[in-house]
Image (cartoon, helix red, strand yellow):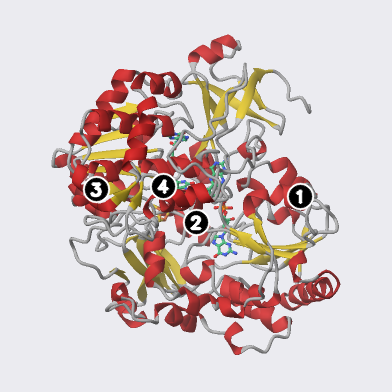
Amino acid sequence: MSESGSLQIVHGVCSHDCPDTCSWKAEVEDGRAVRLYGDRSHPFTRGVLCAKVNHYLERVYHPDRLLYPLRRCGKKGSGSFERISWEAALQEIAQRWASLIEEEGGESILPYSSAGNQGLIQHSSLDMRLFGLLGFSRLDRNICGNVAHEGLCATQGCGTGINPEDIEHSRLIVLWGTNTRVTNLHLWPVIEQARKRGGKVIVIDPIRTRTAAAADRHLAVNPGTDTVLMLAMMHVIIQEGLHDPEYIRDYSEGFEELAAHVLQFTPEYAASITGLTAQEIVEFAREYATTTPSLLRPLIGLEHHPNGAMMFRTIACLPVLTGAWRHRGGGLSRSTGAFQFSALNIDALLMPDTWQKDCRSLNMRDLGRILSGTEDIKPVRSLLVYNSNPAVTMPNQRLVRYGLERTDLFTVVHDLFLTDTARYADIVLPATSQLEHLDIVPSWGHHYISLNQPAIAPRGECVSNTELFRRLASVLRRAESWLFDSDEQLLRAALSGDHPMLKGITLESLREHGSQHLHHEAEWLPFAAGGFSTPSGRARLSSPALAESGLPALPVPGCIPARPAGQLQLITGKTLHFLNSSYSHHERHQNREGTLWIEIHASDAANRGLADGEVVVVSNEQGEICALCQVSDRVRPGVVWMPFGGLRDALGAPAHVNLLTPEAPTDWGGGSGFYGCFVDVFQGKMREG
Ligand SMILES: Nc1nc2c(c(=O)[nH]1)N[C@H]1C(S)=C(S)[C@@H](COP(=O)(O)OP(=O)(O)OC[C@H]3O[C@@H](n4cnc5c(=O)[nH]c(N)nc54)[C@H](O)[C@@H]3O)O[C@H]1N2
Ligand SMILES: Nc1nc2c(c(=O)[nH]1)N[C@H]1C(S)=C(S)[C@@H](COP(=O)(O)OP(=O)(O)OC[C@H]3O[C@@H](n4cnc5c(=O)[nH]c(N)nc54)[C@H](O)[C@@H]3O)O[C@H]1N2
Ligand code: SF4
Ligand SMILES: [Mo]
């Protein structure tokens, strides 16, 4: 913290679920934050925030911010609440939970959270200690990232990739199923630097996104068919001798089987599946294999398909075949999250040894099924939701909302705003913003670890997540001192240990510098000389371990659902002005995004007699919503695109694309095949009136 006159300047860091983890500075006058801007001295932030967080102070001081605990006084979902004291709120929770624990066991209570705050201790710390000790149901937080991680692990034994800052050295950058210029804005200058040095950008995406429009080449692949493209690339690379025999010999296993297997995936076959031409496929494979260094960057788009894990298992074979890992700027770059977490002392933070053993684990993706009784399990009687807004963000919304309406379900929601989920709560608790609490934020998009210092006092009666869990432990009459550790103690626990990457990184040094790079050699390359994290240390082109678990040993196309006749495949994407559903309470962000729309190819619009600008119904067996029809050449025939997040329909009502998406499981990794979603689009009235 620095001071000039009565003005204090406080270093903080964005806690949104975004790879960029920007460092910021908040200027505080008389206890009120008056300015917030990106830290100019931070090499990744470069003094810039984004279209969402440029207005963060509006979020902090928003008139709709929850400032006090509330108790429901109307029907669930109606949004009628009355103010109550913290004491009354906590007493009610303690009473309800105590009788549930006694009568039905701790597993009848499900704490439900995601990465709404991805700070180290506000994401997971005292909650895990408390709920683990009490034997509550655990949550598989698999909606984002896990499928990709598990897929990469099948080939590499770990999810590690190169340092994203090294992408400036790449000569060919393949942005594969990621919309960098919208979702990972601060990587774009690194990519532009590579371009200045002669690098080229290829985007593979069914949609001509902002990123695709800015690339050197865009390959508009059919959704879900990327595995076939990857296998055909391997076919071309091996047939034309463009692979790196020495790297393969020294650092991989199963090459012979793979080489024989990919013979069947000819460019012509792949063309018939992917919608690209055979020539495009051959050229792309050659360019990929002959450009050094070449970099693949798949982020999340690929994992929201039923074959999501196979997408990542397969893509990870490519840089092994070409030996791209040898070169700085070559290989693959995805989330840096696991890499950051490997340096931190997570056991000291979460204390898993104190958790009750054998508690059931429920998949967050299945919330609707869990709450509505569709799953044959012991019922969940109480939910505590924080860091998440599942009534918008989880698939199969009709079922989620049906479950949330249950009168015997006791729901507590802790959030900054009265979200769609909070509207179904019995008790709503007010949460602090990132300006009001302490944390460290490890990044999943770079190698800096950053300290967020509180800049202002909590507004109203807001409390941070960690403070909520201390209060819950107290009202539940727990005596264990480690349930009451302060935020500073928690951070010190996580920084304890002697991991070499934390050399020179302490709470004190972070207070001094704000943000520090993990300690590793400047020229660090993860697999230049093999050293994969498999038992043999070799990358698995063929994997006996996968075969043992009943999955194909070799990379295969995986489940690519066929499009039912007459229907269109719906891809739902992130928007510029919302962070998933966050910022949907902000008029400015609503206005920028406009009314919910659907982009449809001219040929599909003509077949259905749809005109640009008219209101259409988008419908399937799960639900239906209204949207403005936008005839667009950004989408391929057969594919439609809708924005996901906090948009409203033409009547101003919240309109959720997840009414249409299935909770279809991914092949492994426990995720959701959101994009294996098919819809009818037509004129006229909604079936439900
Ligand atoms: N502005 C903004 N930024 C965000 C977010 C936000 O909501 N708004 N959300 C944050 C979060 S939680 C995450 S996980 C990241 C996600 O970051 P990204 O991975 O970039 O995000 P997605 O929009 O999920 O997917 C990226 C692209 O995959 C494409 N895609 C879909 N199916 C396929 C396919 O079968 N093949 C190929 N090749 N491409 C496909 C989509 O059209 C989309 O353009 O963004 C983060 N950043
Ligand atoms: N159709 C479709 N669905 C998707 C996706 C998609 O691309 N298409 N993307 C998926 C992905 S990748 C993700 S990550 C998920 C995201 O799903 P969610 O994690 O549910 O994301 P948000 O909508 O941002 O909700 C986060 C909530 O946490 C609250 N919050 C923020 N900070 C704090 C805090 O410190 N304490 C508490 N208690 N609350 C806080 C915010 O106000 C917000 O209401 O959505 C998934 N759903
Ligand atoms: S949402 Fe992402 S890009 Fe925006 S300020 Fe936060 S970390 Fe940076
Ligand atoms: Mo995500």
Quarter of the image where one finds residue 521: bottom left
Report the residue marked by disc 2: 58
Which is nearer the eye, 90 or 309? Answer: 309
State the separation of the CA atoms marked 1 and 4: 40 Å
* Mark number, residue 51: 4
Sequence-wise, which precedes: disc 1 or disc 2?
2
Tell me if 598 is positioned left or right of 5 in this view. Answer: right
* Residue 567 visible in the shown view: yes
* Residue 463 visible in the shown view: no
Image position, residue 354 (x, y; %): 61, 80
- In the image, what residue occupies the spot 28% across and 45% down? 320
Residue type indicated by callout 1: Glu
**Mark 4 and mark 3 residues within 8 Å of each other at the beta carbon:** no
Report the residue marked by disc 1: 375
Quarter of the image where one finds residue 570: top right
Q: Is the C-beta of the residue carrying label 4 under 8 Å from the nearest atom of ligand 1? A: yes
Indicate whether 94 appears above or below 386.
below
